[in-house]
Amino acid sequence: MPRVVLVLLLILVAVTAYCVRRGGDAPPVSGDPAAAEEEPGLDENLSGAPLRATIELRPEEPLLLCGNLCCLPPVPSYNQLLLQYLIESYPGTPDEDPPDLVDHYPRWVRAHGVPVFATTAQTPDWTDRALFLTDYVGRRGETRRRLLQDVGGSVESESAVWRGLAWLARQQRADGSWQFNVGEHPDRIGATALALLAFLGAGETHLRGTYKAVVSSGLGYILDQQPLPRRGPPPLSADPFAHALGTMALCEAVGMTRDRERLLAAAQVAVNRIVASQAPNGSWGAAPGQRGDISLVGWQVQALKAAAMSRAVTVPAATFKKAVDFLNSAGAGRRKPAYGPFDKTWAFPGTTCTATGLLCRYLIDGWGPDNAGMMEGVFGLMPRAPAAGPGSAPKRIDDVYFLYHATQVVRYFEGDEWETWNRGPKGALGVRTLGTRDWLVGLQHMDGDEAGSFDPDAAWVGKHLGRLGTTAFAVLTLEVYYRHLPLYKRANAGDGAVPLPDGVK
């Protein structure tokens, strides 16, 4: 009997030592002991309370806030996501490392007295210059942190993004897909792609990040649904809206990871389908070659632009040119500041069609903040900012589809218009309040089963895409600070746009 007791004690000591090593008070040391020296860390406390844990990070497992292996959750908690953000946004050393790759080597990070040791199973090939070339660098590391601060994001807005991602992750189905809870979208491609875009926009991919398993499963579902090419490139979905979203997700994933083996061929086939389906007038409709509307054009253009930004998927220049021809036919006035759904007949300032048209102009037609048509178009959008109307801001999202497109347009326009849209108009003391950013964060559910989500809006998305669609679009809107780097800069960055003369069209 004493031998049995001794053996049990030895096993208990071994298990305790292992747990301490994995997540206890003594962090692991790799290589040179000098590597364990602490570096100066971050100033902000994103969680609102000091973090009290030492964590070993591995790419293949989520963060743990304790050393108990039984605590591994299927979906990371809100505090875990905040800690992940603290770690990934830290610039690290040496200073010459690219900002989007600094998390690829072991380092210590001091975050309010909490040492965090980050490791990776594979060291990147520093001689591969393709690692340094990405149009999605704003979504990662120090670049994201700088953009979040400089463009007008906040700790609260970034926290809302991660809460939204946590809710979206909980909605994922066993086969990796998502499904809209209202409307008629049985193929689930559109819902899956829209959710994936929210994760990709925050820098999460199938190769790295807290939600890499979620993203990998979602991409796998889309790949599994793509039929083999027979006569021409096959669609991801019979719904052109869903096909564009799926193409966009594949192309962004290619651009962010350079994963040519798994994703490139599927992304190119999906883009070829969009190219082949364009109507003679430059639009896209419900069927290949059929005349369409500006809403479908907007999503095909965003998908094609994502392909071009991937620097791996090919898009014919003629396809963009034909799309511009359609925009010219749908735009009203000499400067084309407003757009109708099919042509200029119903083109009015400040509509969703106008916001979509202006975003397309920005993406493919060289319209920067100094373009006269863009100036006039943005001035037409400003009255629809949430805090622009009389009284307080609405208690519900009126039209998240408009909000998603218009926020991007005004963000890339910069200047005082963006400050007003994002942080609100100036009050009597010059302080901006009631902006889109804080208003949108305030509408997010904080408790219960719907924590992290947004109530369905009062327009098309709420009626056809439900809570899932509204939440995904709201999260994408809150990622506007870093999701894409600006393509153009205004000539005088600190000045407002030059007003157009009254009556000029």
Image: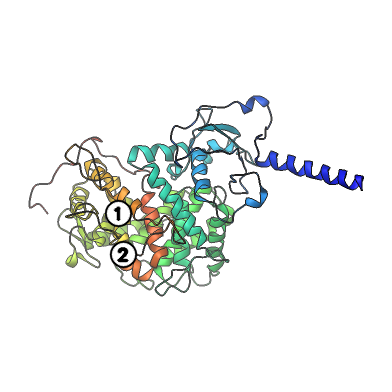
For the residue labelled by badge 2, is the local secondary structure a helix, a strand or a loop?
helix
When the figure is inspected, residue 304 is found, relative to residue 433, above or below; the finding is: below
Which residue is found at the position 27% from the left and 44% from the top?
423
Q: Quadrant of the C terminus?
A: bottom left
In-image side of 100 versus 384 (left or right): right
Where is residue 457 drawn, in percent x and y? 32, 64
- Circles 1 and 2 in contact, beta carbons < 8 Å: no
10 Å neighbourhood of mark 2: few (<14), some, or many (≥20)?
A: many
The quadrant holding residue 339 is: bottom left
Where is residue 242 drawn, in percent x and y? 42, 66
Query: Is 216 or 80 nearer to us in this picture?
Result: 80
Colouring method of the image: rainbow
Callout 1 amino acid: Leu
Q: Which residue is mark 1?
A: 359
For the residue labelled by badge 1, is the local secondary structure a helix, a strand or a loop?
helix
Which residue is found at the position 26% from the left and 36% from the top?
493
Query: Is 431 or 376 nearer to us in this picture?
Result: 431
When the figure is inspected, residue 489 is found, relative to residue 392, above or below; the finding is: above
The quadrant holding residue 75 is: bottom right
The quadrant holding residue 239 is: bottom left
Callout 2 amino acid: Ser
> In this rendering, does residue 484 appear at all?
no
> Cα distance, mark 1 to mark 2?
11 Å
Where is residue 185 drawn, in percent x and y? 43, 72
10 Å neighbourhood of mark 1: few (<14), some, or many (≥20)?
A: many
In-image side of 176 versus 415 (left or right): right
Specify the farthest residue to the front.
Answer: 1
Mark 2 or mark 1, which is nearer the start of the sequence? Answer: 2
Q: Which residue is mark 2?
A: 295
Q: In the rendered structure, find residue 17 and report the number of the disc placed on it.
A: none
